[in-house]
Image (spheres, helix red, strand yellow):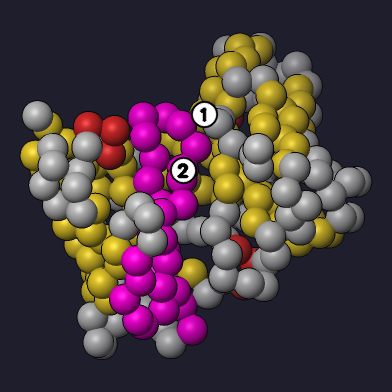
Amino acid sequence: DAKTTQPTSMDCAEGRAANLPCNHSTISGNEYVYWYRQIHSQGPQYIIHGLKNNETNEMASLIITEDRKSSTLILPHATLRDTAVYYCIESTGTASKLTFGTGTRLQVTL
Amino acid sequence: EAQVTQNPRYLITVTGKKLTVTCSQNMNHEYMSWYRQDPGLGLRQIYYSMNVEVTDKGDVPEGYKVSRKEKRNFPLILESPSPNQTSLYFCASSLKATMNTEAFFGQGTRLTVV
C-alpha cells in the first residue's frame, strides 16, 4: 500500500467543522481511502472509507477529488472528544493490511 | 457488544521470559492481525491470519509467533522477549480479508521488557 501525506497537526474550535486533508497522489485504481482515528493510546477506530465517490456516515463525510489524488475528512461539528490522531490510509482491502503513517493530530479547543 | 479483547492491558516482564498476549473477537471475523506501535513509527503489522490455521508474516515478524487454532482467538507469543519489543500492541479483526470492510481494534497491550 502506498504512502499518504497528512499535516502533522491541526486545531479546531469546538462546534466548528474540522477539515482534515490527505494527499495520496500515487493511489492506484483499486485502492480505497480509509480514515481511522486514535484517541490517546486507545485502539484505532474506523471512521469512514471510500473509493471515488463522496461518502457520509454518522461520524463524518469523506470528500475525494475527481482525480483521486487527495481527499478531505470532514467532522461537521467537532467536539472536545474528537481530539485524536487521524490516519488517512490507502488499502486495496485484500489481506486487510493497513499501513498507518503518523497521521494528523487534531486538537479541538473551547 | 461487538469487540476485540486483549489481555493483559499492561505487562512488565524480564528479558527472556516467554509471554503470551491473548486476543479474542466475538464477531466471527475471518481476518485477524497484530500491530505494534512505537513513537514516530506509527503502527506496523507483525503477523496476520486470513482464517483458522492460516497465518503469515507482516512487516516486523522477528521475535514473534502466532497461532490461529480457533476463529475467535489469535494469541501473540514472545518466546524470548527483548527490550526492543517494548511497545504498545494492538490486535485487530476484519470480517474477511478480501472485502473492503472496517477493522476493529482491541484496546491495546502496553508491554515493557526490562
Image position of B79 (left or right of B98): right
Relative to B94, is A109 above or below?
above
The type of residue carrying mark 2 is Pro
Marks 2/1 same chain = no
- Residue A50: say if magenta: yes
Relative to A1, is A15 above or below?
above
Element at label 1: strand
Residue B80, x across and y down, in percent = 74, 26
For the residue carrying disc 1, how many other residues have a C-alpha within 10 Å: few (<14), some (14-19), or many (20+)? Answer: some
Which residues fall within the magenta stretch?
Answer: A30-56
Image position of A30 (left or right of B90): left
Q: Quadrant of the N terminus of chain B?
A: top right
Q: Which mark is residue B87?
A: 1
Element at label 2: loop
The residue that label 2 is drawn on is A44
Residue sitting at 75 percent across and 22 percent down? B19
For the residue carrying disc 2, how many other residues have a C-alpha within 10 Å: few (<14), some (14-19), or many (20+)? Answer: many
